[in-house]
Image (cartoon, coloured by chain):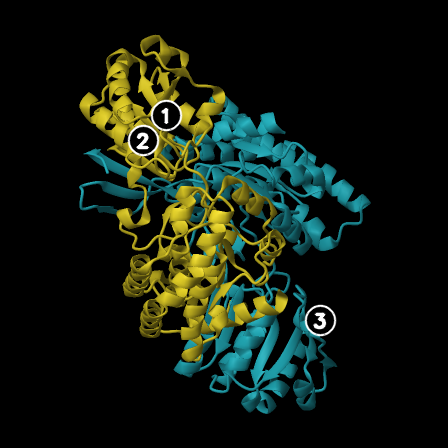
Chain colours: A yellow, B cyan
Amino acid sequence: MESFLQKAKAAAATVASLSDGEKKSLLHKMAQALLHNSDAIIKQNAVDMENAEKNNLSAALTDRLLLNKERIEAMATSLEEIAALKDPVGKIRDGWILDNGLKLEKVSVPIGVIGIIYESRPNVTSDAAALCFKSGNVCILKGGKEAQNSNEIIAKTLRDVLAANDLPIEAVSLLPDSSREGVAKLIKQDSFVDLIIPRGGEQLIRYVNENASVPVVKHDKGLCHSYIHKAADLKQAVDIAINAKCQRTGVCNAMETLLVDAAVAADLLPTLKQRYEVEGTQLKGCEKTRKIIDIEAATEEDFHTEYLDNILSIKVVENVEEAVAHINRYGSGHSEAIITQDCDASETFLNGVDAACVYLNASTRFTDGAVFGLGAEVGISTNKLHARGPMGIEDLTTYKFKVYGKGQIR
Amino acid sequence: MESFLQKAKAAAATVASLSDGEKKSLLHKMAQALLHNSDAIIKQNAVDMENAEKNNLSAALTDRLLLNKERIEAMATSLEEIAALKDPVGKIRDGWILDNGLKLEKVSVPIGVIGIIYESRPNVTSDAAALCFKSGNVCILKGGKEAQNSNEIIAKTLRDVLAANDLPIEAVSLLPDSSREGVAKLIKQDSFVDLIIPRGGEQLIRYVNENASVPVVKHDKGLCHSYIHKAADLKQAVDIAINAKCQRTGVCNAMETLLVDAAVAADLLPTLKQRYEVEGTQLKGCEKTRKIIDIEAATEEDFHTEYLDNILSIKVVENVEEAVAHINRYGSGHSEAIITQDCDASETFLNGVDAACVYLNASTRFTDGAVFGLGAEVGISTNKLHARGPMGIEDLTTYKFKVYGKGQIR
C-alpha cells in the first residue's frame, strides 16, 4: 500500500503542473478511448451482470450496473463536458497589497490525492476520474464490489491514455486492496491522501467518518422536509408537496416528511390525501393529522427515516418556529422548503433552518450541482466545512497564498 | 456531557440569530467586564503562577501564563477590536438566477458549535470566545491545565455578561471535563460539535486528528525553509535568511532549514556563518555545506526537526527542482520562501511547493493573520481543506444556499 501511495503522491505533483490545454487534450483522448474500447467494456460488464444475477442483486441496482453502447457514449460525452469546464486551478480568488509592499495572491490549487468511495454505477468511475484530473488532482477510486470488472476495464482504458502520453498511470487508480481492510488502511493515510469523499450507504459513511484521519467530505443521506405555512398559496403548496415527494422517490433531495400548519390543515389535508392516492404514496401521520384524515400512524422512528421510497410522513405544526425546531431536530441538513407568501415567516424559516439548501416556494428536488449551474457534480456534501450542498469542480481545489516581496523582512 | 452539549447546540441557534449590533454591544460589555474584574482575575492567575513555580514550569511558559493590569487591558482591547470587525455572517458570497427563475444566494452562516483546544496563554480564552461569538458561533474551550484558574475566571466574567443580557451562558463554555477523557469524548460528538480546532503540541494534534469524528482544522507545526537561488540578490538573501531565523525563534513561521544553491554556496556560506555567529545561532550542515564552512553535521533527523530555537540546518542543493523536492518531502506545508531575481525559478518554486504560504524575496516571518490583514487571527491552519494558512474570522463561517422560487417544480 505505501509504495502505491508514494507513487500516487508523486503523480499528484505532475498532474498539478499540467496546463488546461494538456488536461483538455488528455480528457478528449480518454473519451475517445472509452468509445474505442466499448466492446471490451461491455464484455467485462457482462461478467458483473452475470454475478449480479447469481447474487440476486435487486432490479434497481442491476439496472444501475448495466453498461451498453448508449451508456458508454454518455460516459464519453460526460468526459468531454468536464474537459470543457473552466479550469478551477490558478484562479486568483482574492489579492491585495500590504502597507510594506508585499503583494498577496490567494490562488486556487489542486488538493492533491483524493480518495472516492462509491457504489454501483460504473460511470462514476470515469466521471470521478475526470473531475479529479481536470482539477489537477490524483484520484484513488474504490467502487462497489458488484461493479469490480467494469470499473477495472474503465480505469485501465483511462490509464492506457495516461501511459501513452508519458504521464504517471497512478494519476487514476483503483484502490489496489478493495476489501474492507483496504478501505480501513486508506482512510488512515493522512501523509499521502488529502481528502476522502464517501458516497453511499449511511453505515459506510459513519464508518469512514469515525475512523478516518484523512479529512472527510461526506455525502450523507437527505432527510428533507417541506413546510406548508398558513399564508401559503394553497394550490402551489399542493403542487410542490406532490413534486417533492413523487417526481422521483429514490433520491436524496426528495421530501420524506411534510409539515402542515395547523391553521390550514383541515382545508389542505383531504386534498393532499386525494392527490397522493393518485400517485400511490403511502401516508403516515401524527395524531393531529389523523384527526383530519384517516391514515396510518407515524412513529418517532418514521420522522427519523429517509424512506427513499413512495412513503411520506405528515405532521401538523402550530407555527413556523415549531417547523424550524422539528427540521433542526430530525433533518439531515440537506434540503428544506417553506411554502408561504409571508415575508417574515419566509426569512424566519430560511435563516433558522440549519441546512445546505433552504427553499422558498419551490421543490427540494432542485438540489443538484448541474441544476444549480455548477457544471458536473462531485456529489452533494452534507459536511459544513470546505464544501456544503452541491459540490462542483471548484470544491476539488484548495488555495495557497503566494506572497511577492522585494526583500521585506520583519 | 450530553446534556451540556445539547445546551451548547441550543445556544448556537440563539447566537446565530443575533444582529451585528447586538454582538458588538455584548463584546463591548465583555471588554468592560474584564477590566472591571481585573483584580479578581489577577488573584486567580496568581494561583496558577504559584502552581507553575511548584511544578517547575519553564521561564518561557511561566511568562506566557502571567496576567497583570496591562495584559488584561490588552485582552479588553482585543475584544473591542474583534467587535469592530466586519460581521462575517450574512455575506452573500455568490448569487445567480437559473433559467427557470429560481434565485440562488450562497450566504455565509455560522458553523455552529466549535471546540478549541489550546495551551498556556490565558488571553486565548477571551480572544477565541470573542472570535466565535462575533462570527455567531458557540465555543467550547479547553485550555491548558496550568492556566485552569485563570481560564475559569475569564470565562465566568464573559458568561456573567451573557447571563445579565438574557443570553444562554453556554455560548461561551469551558469543557466541563478538562481531562484527557473529556477531550476524547468531545472530539467524537459529531452530532453536537461542528468543528474542532487543536492548537498546540504535535502529539495533541496527532491524537485529535486520529481520533476525532468531528471535522478538524489543525494548527500544526511550521517546519519552514528558505531557498537562496543562484540568481538571488546576495545581500538581500543574507538579510532575509537572518531575519527568517533570528527575529523570533520560538514561532511557527520562523525558518528551520536554509537551502543554498550550489552555484553560490562557496560565496555565501562564509558570510552567512559570520552573520549567524553574531546572532548566536547554532548551525548544522549537510556534507556539501561542511566542505565550505566548518560546522556540526546535520542528520536526517535534523531536517525533520522544528527546532523552535536558535538552531538552523543548512543544505546545499543543485537547483530549484531539488529545493522544491526537499521542501515537499521535509516541510510541514506552512511557509516557504525563495530568494531569486529569476522569474522562471520563482514561478517554478511558488507553484511547485505545496504549502499554505509561498514567498518570493521575503521573510517567512510574515505569515500571520493580522499581518496579512485578516483582522484577528484564529490561528494558522495546516489543513488543506476549509481554511489554509492564516485563518481569519471569515473562516469561522460556512455557507448555505438560499433558493427563492415562485412555485417551481421539477
- Mark 1 and mark 3: span between their CA atoms? 62 Å
Q: Name the residue: 32% across, 57% down.
A: A71
Q: Quadrant of the N terminus of chain B?
A: top right
Residue A12 relative to residue B304: left or right: left
Residue A341 relative to residue A101: left or right: left
Occupied quadrant, residue A191: bottom right
Q: Contact, CB < 8 Å: mark 1 with mark 2?
A: yes
Occupied quadrant, residue B296: bottom right
* Closer to the camera in the image, B179 or A89: A89
- Mark 1 and mark 2: span between their CA atoms? 7 Å
Q: Is residue A92 above or below residue B159?
A: below
Q: Chain of mark 2?
A: A
Residue type, label 3: Glu
Give the label on residue B305, or none: none
The residue to which callout 3 is attached is: B301
Residue B224 relative to residue B356: left or right: right
Count of numbered labels shown in the rendering: 3
Q: Contact, CB < 8 Å: mark 1 with mark 3?
A: no
Q: Determine whether the residue tagged by mark 3 lies in a helix, strand or loop.
A: helix
Q: Determine whether the residue tagged by mark 2 lies in a helix, strand or loop.
A: helix
The residue to which callout 1 is attached is: A312
Residue type, label 1: Leu
Q: Name the residue: 54% across, 44% down.
A: A204
Dot 2: within a 10 Å radius of its alpha carbon, few (fewer than 14), some, or many (20 or more) residues? many
Q: Residue B119 appears at what percent x and percent y?
A: 65, 47
Give the label on residue A245, or none: 2
